[in-house]
């Protein structure tokens, strides 16, 4: 069963692997994900149904899914999609509980990421949400560039709130505030969570933060002290956005995040032996 804890953790191997230049063999992906399923994460962001031309690393998501051992885990699976067609593919699998869609606060990044304007992406989100509601699947919207962007696009917290207004009107209950290129700081993470959470009490906000290792603890603490209890991370901090200017900026490191949450008095229910074993396989995946 999902542990009785106030902390909800999503492990993101898809985010960690998708930018790798060398294709990770399907057998190795399956081995890694099956190890992660033993750790006790609430959600596993395991793959994506997107164009294989855009993300070649995820071309085998359907085959990987068919080989995952879900018999002894309560971890739920999440797949990322970039359009309605991808959502329809994900919705065909009963094993998938969550579909994730990247919606950007930055017009430039929305075009780069999904070849759509923000307005077009919002219209597609509405269609995907309608499908999800009819098929009893949860839609997670990732608000990328939620803390700023490197393109010179206009940014302020009111833009984030305006998008949350639209998503809330669609009855979307899962929104991940995402720092795509590592521009967030402890000073701007807390205020954004504090502003949004009271305005949308039916929405579960998560922190999807990319960071340098030395900044990880401060970012986790800032989100936690602002009331956030849902956190995304990737083992060893692998991956990150290729648009990040700093090559040391990667995903939030799962182990650093857990350590900081424990220092704050939380006790994430994680199988440490399974976490260590998954770390050994990660060394093979990201060699």
Image (cartoon, rainbow, N blue to C red):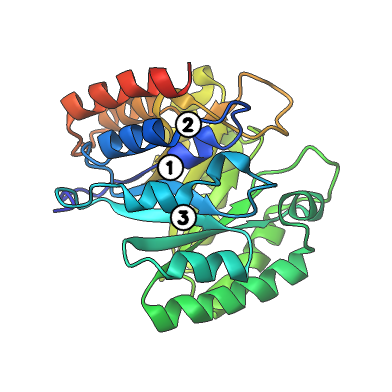
Q: Does residue 276 appear left or right of residue 253 in this picture?
A: left
Q: Residue 79 carries which label?
A: 3
Q: Which residue is drawn at 76% across and 70% down?
A: 119
Q: Does residue 70 appear left or right of residue 189 in this picture?
A: left
Give me the C-alpha separation between circle 1 and circle 3: 14 Å
Circle 3 sits in a helix, a strand or a loop, which is it?
strand
In the rendered image, is residue 234 in sight? yes
Q: Choose top left, top right, bottom left or bottom right for residue 116.
A: bottom right
| Residue 26 vertical placement versus 119 (above, below) | above
Residue 14 x, y percent position in the rendering:
48, 41
Give me the C-alpha separation between circle 2 and circle 3: 19 Å
Q: Residue at x 59, y 26 (%)?
A: 22
Instruction: Say which label, 1 or 2, has the lower sequence index.
Output: 1
**Crowding near pointer 1: few (<14 within 10 Å), some, many (20+)?**
many
Frontmost residue, 50 versus 118: 50
Q: Residue 39 carries which label?
A: none
Q: Choose top left, top right, bottom left or bottom right for residue 204.
A: bottom left
Frontmost residue, 28 versus 236: 28
| Residue 102 vertical placement versus 128 (above, below) | above
Q: Which residue is drawn at 44% across and 54% down?
A: 62
Instruction: Say which label, 2 or 3, has the lower sequence index.
Output: 3
Location of mark 2 (residue): 252
Residue 275 x, y percent position in the rendering:
25, 27
Q: Residue at x 42, y 70 (%)?
A: 92
In the rendered image, is residue 229 in sight? no
Location of mark 1 (residue): 232
Circle 1 sits in a helix, a strand or a loop, which is it?
strand
Circle 2 sits in a helix, a strand or a loop, which is it?
loop
Give me the C-alpha separation between circle 1 and circle 2: 7 Å
Instruction: Say which label, 1 or 3, has the lower sequence index.
Output: 3
| Residue 110 vertical placement versus 23 (above, below) | below
């Amino acid at each position: 069963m999902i542990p009785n804890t106030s902390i909800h953790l999503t492990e993101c191997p898809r985010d960690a692997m998708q930018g790798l230049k060398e294709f990770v063999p399907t057998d190795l992906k399956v081995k890694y994900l099956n190890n992660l399923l033993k750790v006790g994460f609430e959600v596993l962001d395991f793959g994506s149904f997107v164009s294989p031309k855009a993300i070649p690393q995820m071309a085998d998501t359907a085959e990987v899914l068919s080989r995952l051992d879900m018999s002894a885990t309560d971890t739920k699976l999440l797949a990322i999609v970039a359009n309605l067609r991808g959502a329809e593919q994900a919705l065909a699998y009963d094993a998938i509980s969550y579909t994730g869609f990247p919606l950007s606060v930055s017009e430039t990044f929305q075009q780069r990421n999904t070849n759509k304007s923000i307005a077009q992406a919002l219209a597609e989100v509405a269609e995907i949400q309608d499908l999800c509601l009819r098929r009893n699947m949860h839609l997670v919207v990732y608000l990328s560039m939620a803390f700023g962007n490197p393109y010179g696009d206009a940014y302020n917290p009111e833009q984030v709130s305006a998008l949350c207004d639209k998503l809330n009107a669609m009855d979307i209950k899962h929104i991940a505030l995402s720092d795509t290129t590592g521009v967030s700081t402890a000073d701007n993470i807390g205020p954004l969570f504090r502003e949004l959470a009271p305005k949308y009490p039916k929405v579960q906000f998560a922190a999807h933060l990319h960071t340098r290792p030395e900044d990880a603890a401060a970012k986790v603490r800032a989100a936690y002290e602002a009331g956030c209890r849902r956190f995304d991370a990737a083992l060893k901090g692998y991956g990150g956005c290729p648009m990040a200017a700093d090559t040391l900026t990667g995903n939030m490191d799962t182990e650093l995040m857990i350590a900081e949450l424990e220092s704050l008095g939380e006790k994430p229910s994680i199988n440490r032996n399974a976490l260590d074993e998954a770390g050994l396989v990660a060394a093979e995946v990201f060699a």
